[in-house]
Amino acid sequence: MKVLMVQPGEIPHETDIEPGLESLQAAVDGSIQAVYPYEDPVALICNEEGKFLGLPLNRALRDDTGEIYDIIAGNFLITGLGEESFSDLPPDLLEKYKEQFLAPESFARIGGKILAVKQPVPSPEDKERTQQSPYKSGPEL
């Protein structure tokens, strides 16, 4: 089934996973929790114990006024909803949620309040540059 995968520090991407509990658990690295924070027919599937296990904080969930009410820890998926189970995420909703979660976020507690800071979206060139080591060793020096 086609879903949107959102990983900490990364740009969301479309991926195909097998339907069923095992593939959902593998995608979020543990027991799943499905939440339904949106009016669209979608589910957000995350690791049920992500915060307890100390998984890296990923993205904030905000209410209608933009206030943070929760932060997802670890990988999460956005799936479509079928009659009785999760299903493919329709292309229009895939684009909508890809845009919503496009920028990775960092979090800070300031004055008793948690703030989410959107990070710059890395370009493909940036990603390629960070994968190549700037340091040389051996005879090339």
Image (cartoon, rainbow, N blue to C red):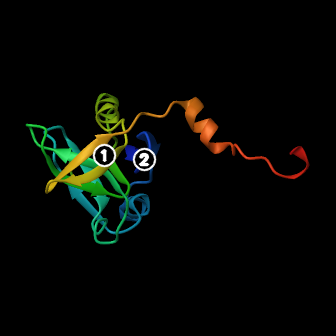
User: Label 1's element?
Assistant: strand
The answer to which of 31 and 117 lies nearer the viewer is: 117
Q: Which residue type carries mark 2?
A: Gly
Q: Is residue 25 placed above or below 61 in the rendered structure?
A: below
Sequence-first disc among 2 and 1: 2
Q: Which mark is residue 9?
A: 2
User: Neighbour class for label 2 at 10 Å: few (<14), some, many (≥20)?
Assistant: some
Identify which residue is drawn at 36% across, 35% down. Answer: 102
Quarter-of-image position of residue 93:
top left
Do labels 2 and 1 touch, CB within 8 Å? Answer: no
User: Label 2's element?
Assistant: loop
The answer to which of 24 and 62 lies nearer the viewer is: 62
Residue 68 in the image: state x and y as whole percent.
16, 47
Residue 108 in the image: state x and y as whole percent.
27, 52
Residue 19 in the image: state x and y as whole percent.
39, 54
- The C terminus sits in image quarter: top right
Q: Is residue 75 visible?
A: yes
The answer to which of 16 and 29 lies nearer the viewer is: 29
How far apart in space, not on screen, are marks 2 and 1 (Cα)? 20 Å
Q: Which residue type carries mark 1?
A: Thr
User: Neighbour class for label 1 at 10 Å: few (<14), some, many (≥20)?
Assistant: many
Residue 94 in the image: state x and y as whole percent.
33, 34
Identify which residue is drawn at 62% across, 36% down. Answer: 128
Q: Which residue is mark 1?
A: 79
Q: Is residue 116 left or right of residue 136?
A: left
Identify which residue is drawn at 48% across, 34% down. Answer: 122
- Mark 2 vs mark 1: give the one in front: 2
